[in-house]
Image (cartoon, rainbow, N blue to C red):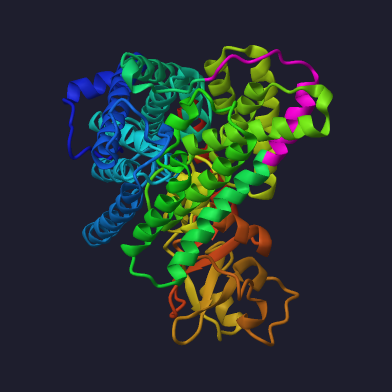
Amino acid sequence: MATPSRYLEAPRRLRAFVRAHETSLVVLAAMIGTIGGLVVLAMSVAVAALHALLFNISTTERLSSQPSVETLRAVLVPSLGGLLLGGALLLLLRWRPAREIDPIEANALHGGRMSFRGSVIVALQTTWSSGVGASVGLEAGYTQLASGLAASLGRGFHLRRADQRIMVGCGAAAAISGAFGAPLAGAFYAFELVIGGYTSASLTPVGVAAVAGYFVTHGFEDLSLGISVGPVGDVVGRDLAVAALLGILAALFGILIMRGVALCETGLAKTRLWPPLRPALGGLAVGLLALLTPQVMSSGHGALHFSGLVSMPLQIIAGVFALKALASIISLGSGFRGGLFFATLFMGALGGRLYAAGVDLVWPGLALDPNVYAVIGMSALSASVIGGPLTMSFIALESTGNLWLTTVVLVAVMISTQITRELFGYSFATWRLHLRGETIRSAADVGWIRDLTVRRLMRSDVATVDAGIGIEDFRVKFPLGSKTQVVAVDATGRYVGLAVVAEAHAPDIDATRGLIGILHHRDVVLHPVMNIQEAIAVFDAAEAESLAVVEAGGEHRPVGILTEAHAMRRYAEESDKRRREAIGEV
């Protein structure tokens, strides 16, 4: 049963109507799409206002497209902004010790349940981080708040687990669609990264939300949302091979960025620096880098719109490329909140331009189009860091309208994604979860597996016997047919082993050692907190049909028994149930 929302509770008849009609989900998705578009607008306006106030620029200008920033503002604003953010985070940890759940984790582990208040907090932190010039993207805040609002709406209607997860995906689709002006990319961002798969049941709601989010934000041209790509040349067969090598390089650089953020975070933690000073130090570093080029500040959205991106001297492009990567690593590693989506698009475009120039130096006759490889580079690097190869391919298609170029992009992103999975195994979002101790690698729903614990599956009416009893006495106490197996314990009640009743009654056993001589699995047990996958792994390793369940503490007392057959049957039943829910079967 769904946990009701604290902020919204739909009337019971309306809830019943929505749960009974799939089309009602489409209406909710349209509402979520509109909300997601408004979230993108509100956060974008807030960041523009902060930039205008703190850096003395026009609200219609982009910070990262400025030719220069005043020295005092470049140094002080990110530093003091980081100090304020660090202090706020310290207070927040005392008020809300639990960390906030992002859309991917919510759908993977919690059935689409997200905290509305926590989502607002993350959105505010992201807005402030980008507003003071930290090299982070707003996409994380966009998707967090839009998905959090969608989750609250779904809980208000008591949606089923599968439908609740779709609603969270609708929020993310609307946010990405609006932010990048790409409804197809927004929809597939939801399918690949937030829902963890595509089904016919999720197609219409997610698609409607993405289109709604696009039209809400597209009506405000002054914000210049989306990606502006200049004219691209013809794409020929040789570009497939050249782009494949770019995909390899993008994967390696993407892994380097993700590890760099983790190393920066770990390094600052080892210094034992007062936590609020860490983002302040990171802000100071970004401010000093901004004195060399303001394009390292904020998400880089304005820099990617800069008309002279591919026509700049190669030395400048290389410098901006390296400094932007360093600024992003420092910003996220020091504690600023935000994402890497737009930053990797920007760095990928610069890297693609450098790659085209490098290939032309080695093989001058190719004369590669720099715009073409800027598009390929931005898609391949983002695919490595963010994941979602189809999402990045559709961003390229919707930005250029060139189908043949999109085919080449698809080759590069497939290679980039595959190499990242082989060598690293995570996207940036799931890597951060891994560092916190989680094991998930996608938004595929595995939360039900964790809920299906040994405690829920075991039989608690376990029969016990003193392990020192003789075989004849055991036979009298447990005649054939009375029990299948009995748990043997010592004088203090600690688990000793598992006795099979039929084996004890076999005429050819050695009865001289008593019951202790025929006990099985003396060192192999299950614990109540284990999930079903962990339990099945123990069964496989021990080649056991039944195992005792004992307390995890030092007392080691038996509390139940579980058979492999029952565990496998329940696992199959639950898997089939989730599959049917995902594809919309009744």
x, y percent for residue 246: 71, 34
Callout count = 0
Region in magenta: 229-249
Residue at x 33% of width, y 43% of height = 126
In this orientation, which residue lies closer to the viewer: 424 or 395? Answer: 395
Residue 491 position, x and y percent, is 47, 87
Reply yes or no: does residue 237 show up in magenta: yes
Residue 325 placement (x, y as % from top left): 54, 46
Q: Is residue 567 above or below residue 365?
A: below
Residue 247 relative to residue 226: left or right: right
- Could you tell me which quadrant the C terminus lies in? top left
Left or right position of 480 against 47? right
Q: Position of 369 compared to 342: left or right?
A: right
Q: Nearer the viewer, residue 149 or 555?
A: 149
Residue 27: image quadrant is top left
Residue 181 visible in the displayed image: yes
Rendering coords of residue 119 (x, y %): 29, 42
